[in-house]
Amino acid sequence: MAYEISNNAVKITLPAGADLSSNQYYFVKVNSSGNAVLCAAATDKPIGVLQNDPASGEEASIVVVGGTKLVTNAACDEGTVVGTASTGKGAPYVAGTDTTKFIVGSVILASGADGEIATVLVNCASAARGA
């Protein structure tokens, strides 16, 4: 079962730029208005993982660096590196192969399938493409 690692996480709050009430533990990005919105492309640069379920205009709590739960779009084993899918879910990637995508985390407790929750260590503060 996935778990939180909250003692040393770097968190921020931003206004939700859309209804994110069904996107807890998904990757979000910052839009041009400075609001948190769901990542909508595999090439988006995530700012972090959403920790709550805000409606549009409410405060979105986001883990930028640290341990968190993450909904994934496929099975992700321990040690798998992840970035965002076009749905905002975590997606498994391969460094050196997925060079147009940002790799921002590593799985420490696996998920078994699409829609399941993994535990990951993320660092979206210094996101880099999978070169």
Image: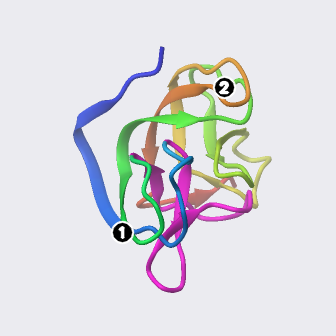
Label 2 belongs to which residue?
Answer: 76
Residue 14 badge = 1
Considering depth in this image, is 57 or 130 the residue closer to the camera?
A: 57
Judged by its main secondary structure, the magenta piece is: loop
Amino acid type for the residue under numbered disc 1 = Leu
Give the image location of residue 84, x and y in percent. Answer: 65, 50
Based on the picture, tell me whether residue 29 belongs to the magenta stretch.
yes
Q: Which residue is located at x 26 percent, y 35 percent? A: 6
Q: Which residue is located at x 64 percent, y 51 percent? A: 88
Q: Are marks 1 and 2 in contact (CB under 8 Å)?
A: no
Please tell me whether residue 50 is drawn above or below residue 25 in the rendered image.
below
Residue 83 badge = none
Give the image location of residue 93, x and y in percent. Answer: 72, 41
| Marks 1 and 2, the one that precedes in the sequence | 1
Q: Quadrant of residue 129?
A: bottom right
Q: Identify the image quadrant of the C terminus.
A: bottom right
